[in-house]
Amino acid sequence: MPQIQIPSPLRQYSGKQASIDVPAKTVGEALAGLISRHPDLKRYLYTDEGKLRAFVNVYVNDEDMRFLQKEATALKDSGTISIVPSIAGGC
């Protein structure tokens, strides 16, 4: 079963879990499964129009899904999805 790695800033919305196993065949199915279990994550990952937010990067086995088939990217049972929000700031 694919595993989704939850970044530290979002763990408060995932029951403090660092990773969650979600049965899915594609990245889109995995993210939908994650949101169905932890609906509070939706506003941090998706826009009101249902698009993945621009500052949220999703990697499948260390490859950016934007350079694969995006949310249609196929997953293997041992696959890992990493959610990496962009960090900005400084002066």
Image: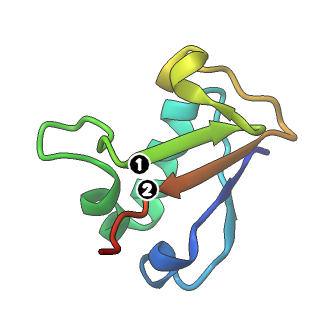
Which dot marks residue 86? 2
Q: How many marks?
A: 2
Up the image or down, 25 lies above or below 31; here it is above
Residue 30: x %, y % from top left: 56, 42
Task: Say which quarter of the image contains residue 8.
Answer: bottom right
- Residue 72 seen in render: no
Point out residue 26 in the picture as x, y percentages from the top left corner: 60, 27
Q: Which residue is located at x 63 percent, y 39 percent?
A: 59
Q: Residues within 10 Å of mark 1 (few under 14, many from 20)?
A: some
Q: How is the image coloured?
A: rainbow
* Res 33 label: none
Callout 2: 10 Å neighbours few (<14), some, many (20+)? few
Measure the alpha-carbon separation of dots 1 and 2. Answer: 6 Å
The residue at the point 36 percent across, 65 percent down is 41
Q: Is 43 left, or right, of 75 in this rendering?
A: left
Q: Residue furthest top?
A: 69
Q: Which residue is mark 1?
A: 56
- Residue at 42 percent of width and 67 percent of height: 38
Q: Nearer the viewer, residue 61 or 3?
A: 61
